[in-house]
Image (cartoon, rainbow, N blue to C red):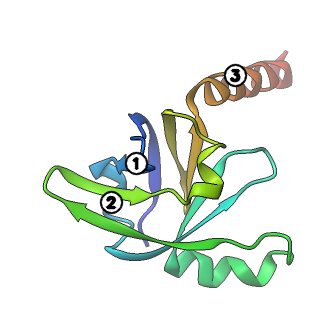
Amino acid sequence: MEVFLGEFFYKMDEKGRLPLPRKLIAGLSEGMTYISISPDGCLILFPARTWTKTKKNMGRLFQPEEIRIKKRKNGWEILIPKNLREHLGREVAIAGCKDYIELWRKNKWILAKEEAGKELVAMFV
């Protein structure tokens, strides 16, 4: 099973198309992927194989939509559904989180990382 790691920044176009980094594509395949809103406001991408394992532990409020990964001449991209685009804005942070991928509005991602860093430091002080 592929592990998703790394932090990347991309711009979503006006039609909701978002490029995906090559480093993360190996764990996804052209075809079905699932997207949903997480409790902290980011969007989560689940590859089909991960969603199959994860859905057993999710409540009914966590209902993802199916989307497709598409190969384009300049790389890979996804089309973010209209009802979910408002959660991202134009500048998007993409974070690999082991067996899924998080998509964040860039400025919210930076703040979330700062807060997580403070919490980590507090644990060791």
Q: Work out whether mark 1 precedes mark 2 in sequence or the reverse, and give the earlier one.
A: 1
Identify residue type, mark 2.
Answer: Ile
Location of the C terminus (image quadrant):
top right
State the SS at label 2.
helix
Among the 4 quarters of the image, the one containing residue 78: bottom left
Kindly identify the residue that appears in the image at 79 percent across and 69 percent down: 62
Q: Nearer the viewer, residue 124 or 83?
A: 83
Q: Work out whether mark 3 precedes mark 2 in sequence or the reverse, and give the earlier one.
A: 2
Kindly identify the residue that appears in the image at 46 percent across and 55 percent down: 4
Q: Work out whether mark 1 precedes mark 3 in sequence or the reverse, and give the earlier one.
A: 1
Above or below 65: residue 113 = above
Q: Residues within 10 Å of mark 2 (few under 14, many from 20)?
A: some
Do the residues bearing badges 1 and 2 touch, measured as CB atoms within 8 Å? no
Identify residue type, mark 3.
Answer: Leu
Q: Residues within 10 Å of mark 1 (few under 14, many from 20)?
A: some
Residue identifier under label 3: 111
Say whether residue 124 is left or right of residue 99. Answer: right
Residue identifier under label 1: 18
Residue identifier under label 2: 25
Do the residues bearing badges 1 and 3 touch, measured as CB atoms within 8 Å? no
State the SS at label 1.
strand
Do the residues bearing badges 3 and 2 touch, measured as CB atoms within 8 Å? no
Identify residue type, mark 1.
Answer: Leu
Above or below 38: residue 48 = below
Alpha-carbon span between mark 1 and mark 3: 22 Å
Among the 4 quarters of the image, the one containing residue 82: bottom right
State the SS at label 3.
helix
